[in-house]
Amino acid sequence: MKIPIALTIAGSDSGGGAGIQADIKTMSALGVYSASVVTALTAQNTIGVTAVHEVEPNFIAEQIDTVCSDLSVSAVKIGMLHRADVITTVAQALERHSIGHIVLDPVMVAKSGDPLLQDEAIEALKSALIPIASIITPNIPEAARLLRRKEEYVKYNKETVAERLLSLGCGSILLKGGHDHDCAESTDLYFDGNNFRYLSTPRTETKNTHGTGCSLSSAICAELAKKHGMELAVFNAKQYISQAIACADALNVGSGHGPIHHFHQNWT
């Protein structure tokens, strides 16, 4: 019996809490073999990022082609892609290999609120990558930037926002509600074009939430690689992340915003 294989395409986090490292940990914890394509190298820890080294598009394409020519990749997770030409390169490479499921985490806004992508890159995301994605997982600031609306509009018009995001061409939406701090629960909205489903879990008070978005999209990818349907994959991923956040303080890693506990199900 072959183990399911997923591929993560994202940047490296030297602190191990987010990016490629979080993706591999999440997929491994959920019983999926993870291959990886590195799009950028960062020097960072739980306190912050001190340097970024970008990987050129042709080498990113070479990594994708090499992995997919040998491994039976069932699902792909895509994290932050820093430039328009990188976004186009990744989209073209994935279309060459006809991957079954593509999970896109459209990382565009830093925790500080600073934009991570310029308008040119966002337009490339909307024209080249979102239309081939099986699901996209924006948070409230990212959804606002994709639709050129205020965050307050997104917060109070979630179903309309989900419909507009779906019209960009993707298969389904998970609009994450973690930034809606007014709510006692963390509530995400899943929409597949037919039904709206709200997924709520208790909100955990902790500073250790680094890598939450990366890990959620990777968990969805892992569940899809295991041949689960999209709605079940999203539900299972939400439960996994909720528990990983709830157990985060047990790790006590670093002096800043530490990681969630990816292996909460495996470590005692």
Image (cartoon, rainbow, N blue to C red):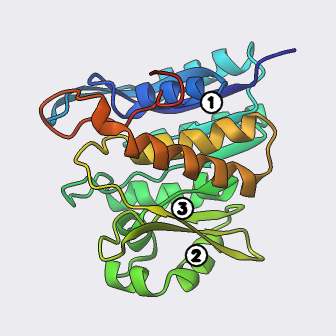
The quarter holding residue 54 reads top left
Question: Is residue 79 among the parts visible in the rendering?
Answer: no
Mark 3 vs mark 2: which is more N-terminal?
3
- Tell how many labels: 3
- In the image, 235 versus 14, the foreground residue is 235
Which dot, 3 or 1, sits closer to the camera? 1
Rate crowding at label 2 as few (under 14), some (14 to 19) or many (20 or more) other CA atoms within 10 Å: many
Mark 1 to mark 2: distance in Å? 28 Å
Q: Are marks 3 and 2 in contact (CB under 8 Å)?
A: no
Q: Amino acid at mark 2?
A: Ala
Mark 3 to mark 2: distance in Å? 15 Å
Q: Which residue is mark 1?
A: 30
Q: Residue at x 33, y 78 (%)?
A: 151
Q: Would you say 82 lies left or right of 100 here?
A: left
The quarter holding residue 92 reads top right
- In the image, 236 versus 88, the foreground residue is 236
Q: Which residue is mark 3?
A: 126
Q: Which mark is residue 197?
A: none
Mark 3 to mark 1: distance in Å? 30 Å
Q: Which residue is mark 2?
A: 162
Q: Amino acid at mark 3?
A: Lys
Mark 1 vs mark 2: which is more N-terminal?
1
Residue 211, percent across and down?
37, 40
**Label 2 secondary element:** helix
Q: Amino acid at mark 1?
A: Leu
Q: Would you say 254 lies left or right of 197 here?
A: left
